[in-house]
Image: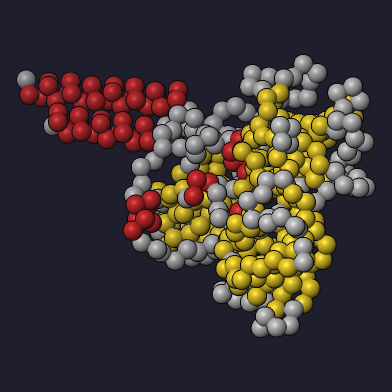
Amino acid sequence: MKNNFSFLFLLLLCNTESFAQNFQYSRKLEVKNAGWNKIFLPAEMESTCRPDFADLRILAIKGNGDTAEAPYAFYNNNYEEVSKKTPLHILNPTHSKGSYYYTFEQKEKQNLKEIELSFKQKNFEYFITLEGSHDEKQWFTLLKDYRILSIHNNITEYTFTTLSFSESSYPFYRLQVPSNVDPGLLSAFMNIDGANNEATQKINISSSQTEINKQSKQTIVTLTLEKEFPVTNLKVFSSFRGDYLRSSTVYKVAQGYDSVLQPGNKYEPVINLVLSSLGTNSFDIPKIKSKQIRIVVNNDDNEPLTIDSIHLSTRLTGIKVQLPEAKEYLMVYGDKNASMPNYDAAEILRQTNPVMHTSFTIGNEESFKKAGTDKPGHWFENDLYLYALMAGVIALLGYFSIVMMRKKQ
């Protein structure tokens, strides 16, 4: 009998510890198809989850009240491959009358609107012509006097060799590069856009301040975000008339300083980039998780560059989760002490190629705490209640032990 009481005590203790996980937030999942599903986690979860998402759990609640954890695996290091680069076959390079000609063949019969070139030369400026053909006999002009360039020196390293044109599906393309010196074309890739809008999220900017500092010859833009959202892409828009090529640096608030805009804040550099009138000025950057971002544009002795607006976005974290049949699905997180779960989902995905569903909707974030109070909304989430419960169980076990000992006497 004593062993039975000990077993009961351990069982209650284990259950108590499982309830004691302090998940602070939840989101409902509306799922149409059970099985393997691909989910992109909203960017705002990064401000309430642990940085490595170790506290993330997906619960499947069945009709009889049973609850099971749905195993999941992160994929591609939180990034989704959204574009495909395919090499074009270079045919019959020729040179005639001060121009070099290259014919490209694409065998996949894809619609494309971008070709990315790579040259051996490091410093150049070419005004190229691009044509398309179905049979290599009749050619149709896609680009004429299109400027590409490359600058590499002690001050600036910049290359713009991406050809953007109206979408076409020619099997053959011909490039004319006006030059008396061999440009040394190394490769040509066609960029096939396969972007999934679900995999990115726009980041809202609560305020923006622009300063033209004549003394330092810089344009300084300071952006304040609503929260510390992760930022992985920024796009700069400028109505500046004329050509420009400006080296710039992206900064974030240094660790240990207030995320709110203050004169005393210090910033640390994240990445150097070049703003140009030639490109789209859209840049993928290392993840910045800061409530404030600063972009400093070096104007040197040129007319100051005007910045109209800056758009921020992030590449969302992706998981692949195996959902069992259930009545309801719940995503819980926000436990700072939780450890990373050990599922076999990653190994299963490495050995199989299951069909992925995306038929889900992620609900709004809800707190387990009651509004207007710091006390948890469930009694089993409060450590004091748990300690009282454990003390009661121990006292009850002690009482029954004494009763059994008296009966034996």
Q: Quadrant of residue 372?
A: top right
Q: Position of residue 32 (x, y in %)?
A: 52, 65
Residue positioned most to the top: 264
From the top left corner, tell me how far across and down residue 30 is, in percent: 55, 58
Query: Which quadrant holds the N terminus?
Result: top left
Q: Is residue 285 above or below residue 183?
A: above
The residue furthest left is 409
Q: Which residue appears at 64% of the width and 55% of the height? A: 184
At x 28% / y 23%, what residue is drawn?
394
Q: Nearer the viewer, residue 65 or 17?
A: 17
Quadrant of the drawing holding the C terminus: top left
Number of numbered discs visible in the structure rendering: 0
Residue 256 seen anywhere in this rendered image of the structure: yes
Q: Is residue 197 left or right of residue 30?
A: right
Seen in the picture, residue 314 relative to 108 is either above or below; the reply is above
Residue 203 on image: x %, y %: 71, 44
- Please name the residue shown 77% across and 77% down the image: 140
**Which of 51 and 87 lies nearest the eye of the viewer?**
87
Residue closer to the observer: 309 or 68: 309
